[in-house]
Amino acid sequence: MLLDLLLPLRCAVCSRVGEAVCVACRALLVRLSPPLCARCGAPGAWPVRRCAECAGRRLAFASARAAILYDEPARRFVTEWKERGQRRLAREAAALVAEVLARPGVDALAVVPSDRERTLARGHRPAAALARELGNLWELPVEPLLERVRGVERQRGLGLKERRRNVAGAFGPSRPPPRSTPQSTPGSPRRVCLVDDVYTSGATAAAASSALRKGGARYVEVVTFARAVR
């Protein structure tokens, strides 16, 4: 194929021609496994109900889990996927999530809404694509349950407290149809899995989960492709 000759498929991690993620680099991606914090999913030396990272915080989600460690190989993968338009990597990311994490016992998947300006710059919505692929693998519907109610500054470079303040109140439940409320809408999901690409500080996940709870969700768990570890 002419397009394949002009733009050959390259590994997102090492740039070797041949596959979206080569076998060697797939093995380099560190799968997260127990022991983990029961609440936020941070890996540790032993299992705990709350770790130093989430202790003392009011979190609207019941648990957060990620498939891989957000180290340098994972960072290269995510950069190619999110910033350089490698949309096919959403399927690779979903396959890794499904490999590591069990299908959640929820009614539906929801997505952290992307920032409009960054979506226009990227030309796609990575988290939404990941949710669609996971929905196919897990046979779960993806519901438009959240919307952004205000813009935020980029989280990169902000401290933990600044990150939380930055996204506080940034999300809201999607507006229900006229003469309806999220609590009374027939079939409105009560158990929801919130999908995002990377869990860094948990600020975005907590703010979006809070909005889901306001919209009627009784239970929210978070699933991400990668997780930063402090």
Image (spheres, rainbow, N blue to C red):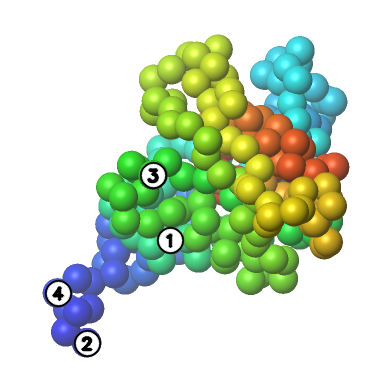
Q: Which one is nearer the viewer's eye here, 186 or 39?
A: 186
At 43% from the left edge and 31% from the top edge, which residue is drawn? 151
Q: Residue 192 location in percent, x, y?
A: 76, 50
Q: Which mark is residue 173?
A: none
**Camera sees residue 217:** no
Would you name the residue on which mark 2 appears?
Answer: 1
Q: Earlier in the sequence, mark 3 or mark 2?
A: 2
Which amino acid type is marked by label 1? Leu
What is the CA distance from the residue labelled 1 to the residue labelled 3? 21 Å
At 66% from the left edge and 30% from the top edge, which residue is drawn? 206
Q: Nearer the viewer, mark 1 or mark 3?
A: 3
Q: Earlier in the sequence, mark 1 or mark 4?
A: 4
Q: Vertical placement of 39 versus 99: above or below?
A: above
Would you name the residue on which mark 3 appears?
Answer: 116
What is the CA distance from the residue labelled 2 to the residue labelled 4? 9 Å
Which amino acid type is marked by label 2? Met
Would you name the residue on which mark 1 appears?
Answer: 89
Q: Residue 32 location in percent, x, y?
A: 65, 42
Quick check: 41 left or right of 112?
A: right
Residue most extreme to the front? 179
Circle 1 crowding by C-alpha within 10 Å: few under 14, some 14–19, many from 20: many
Which amino acid type is marked by label 3? Arg
Q: Vertical placement of 83 versus 102: above or below?
A: above
Q: Nearer the viewer, mark 3 or mark 2?
A: 3
